[in-house]
Image: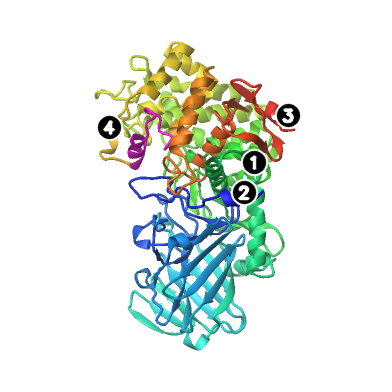
Amino acid sequence: MSLIKYVNIKQGSDSVNRFSNGNTLPLVQRPFGFAAFVPQGDASRGGWFYHPTDHCFEGFRLTHQPSPWIGEHGAIVMQPQIQNPIGGFWGAWSGINPKAATLEPHYMHYYLKRSFCDYELTPTEYGACIRMTFNKDYDRFFSILPVQGQHVYKLCKECNKLFVMTTCDTMRTEDIGKLKTFIVYDFEDGAIDFDNTIVENMAENKREKGLEIEGEKVAIHLALNKKSMEVKMATSFISMEQALVNLKNDSDYENFDDLKAKNEAIWEEYLGRVTIEADEERMKAFYSCMYRAFCFPHKAYEISAEGKPIHFAPSCDKVLEGYRYTDNGFWDTYGTVYAFYTLVAPKECKEMLMGYIQDYKDGGWLPCWTAGTEKKCMPSTGIDAVIADAAVKGMLDGEWLEAAFEGMEKHANNDCPIAGYGRDGCGKYLELGYVPYDAFHESVNLTLDAAYFDYCLAVVADKLGLEDKKAMYLERAKRYQNLFDKETGFMRAKDSNGNFRAEEFSPISWGRDYTEAAAWQTSFAVQHDIEGLSELHGGKDALLKKLDEFFAAPVEYLVGGYGFEIHEMTEMADDNWGQCAISNQPSFHIPFMYAYLGQQDKADYWLDRICKEGFSGNDDGYPGDEDNGTTAIWYVFANIGLYPICPGKAEYTVTKQMVKNIKILGKELDLSDVKGLISHEELMKKLG
């Protein structure tokens, strides 16, 4: 049975910067591919350059964007044009019929009305094959257009290849120039009219015939002799020579249609790693989420001419051996993504972990939020939970686990002098047992995260047989208790003298001491010690009562420390789930706490309601930012009745299975005889 037919890769793309239904792009790529491609509709919207209702089309964009909030690296745009080609998006765009376009995980096709061109793309691991069919006999061009940064274009007559370099990085100005992207295009013999190719410098308003140009706002328009052609392309972060190696390694196909069929088979295999039976609408939502689950992180390593994995390491500005992955934020992804991969993509998951640990070996710090280079747009060190979860499931051991623990200990016990790495407030946390608000912003989250991630260090210490360190980190993992206010029943910020913030407290006031949340969404963030949290509230029944209050509370918010409304507030208020904001990660585990505490019926009620009301297979199919697979995988877990409530513990909460005949890697998943929790070991036995 074909599963691709259920996938809408536009799911979540019907978003704007003030209201997110996913903030996704319709990525056409291989699973975890090095290079991804997307149609660009209007670059004037910044990171929201695609919208499913666009009737304008500016070209296929090579992209690595993990989120519109993060920015982009290594981007260029490719556009067929006729007659008078233009280098700026304002003049190069063509009208299209968005309803007539084909967008699938492995293929996209647009008909460009302005240039009378059928324009198609199917990906390879490091690039793509492009097919252009011009249906009218006008002067034809294939334009490479700049997004941002420095560019170099060189067209080689002798080899029919175009060589491109870009330093595009739209977020971190201090990193511009550090990460270069090298691109090679390989054309058929006789395809290019070298004498009529045009280079354009838009900054100087200058255009002329030529074969090379470099600068910031420069474009090249390759004149074409043929009305129909296929073009191969490949990319590299290392060098142009390596881009040529990648082109050769990627060329294991006969033609465009052969590659398209190979890509379809690859995506069918990944989608089929979890199979279900459900009604048509649920199948569309589920398999659109399954597609999204395998888009990120992106490979950032390449295979050398000698067959070895190599990568460019931005942290030390060198090319080194080993794996690397990027375009991933651990604050978002640690809760769902990697626990899912341990079940359905263990080989790929181990390679990712080796890549993240390689980052530590390269630059001395484990990654926090990478998009080419380190971005650090969110707090804390969520990679601790990813490593601990892999360790307890037997996926990471020996020298790799030892190196990982070394990196974890470094950021758990040292303030980091390099922006973008480590735990904010680490020194104060060690000194006071919490992060004080008079020294650090978002201090409650910093404290709760540090306590949980200290638990994760204890888990890894246990796997390594380091009993003293295990005991020390388990003790530190209790430090969340230092911010619990028994009077209000919430986690609250303290100053350096141990006093709760003096201003009037409101549990619906966002920001300041909390990250993209208020006290309501943050105060349950003790996944590693729900029993201890229960004791603080006065017992299990008292914590269950607090959960009831959480879901029954009015859907209200105050802008608080932000001073203005952020889109996460708007999205929470658009739903009717009390203070539960499945639009963002802090609330993800909270419905499952009911099942953990023995009231599965309430968990089932809320999960069923959230899945039905908040998700669909449509273009507006998410209740908030999707965030690199996190929300998609949350939906997958909720539907199959399994959730990793605390990555780092080899167990899952069990809830009602909302779909039928579930199989993971071909093995039936029947949880009808399980209540509350199931260990990873028991689950593996059930799955054979």
Callout 4, which amino acid? Leu
What SS does tag 4 mark? loop
Choose the circle earlier in sequence order: 4 or 2.
2
Q: How crowded is mark 2: few (under 14 residues within 10 Å), some or many (20 or more)?
A: some
**Is 239 above or below relative to 602?**
below
Distance, label 4 to label 3, CA atoms, is 48 Å
> Is residue 101 covered in magenta?
no
Residue farthest bottom in this picture: 195
Write down the residue under mark 2.
3
Choose the circle earlier in sequence order: 2 or 3.
2
Write down the residue under mark 3.
685
Callout 2, which amino acid? Leu
Q: Choose mark 4 or mark 1, whichever is in front.
A: 1
Q: Choose mark 1 or mark 3, whichever is in front.
A: 1
Write down the residue under mark 4.
558
Distance, label 4 to label 1, CA atoms, is 42 Å
Relative image position of residue 534 (x, y in whole percent): 47, 15
Q: Residue 275 got which mark? A: 1
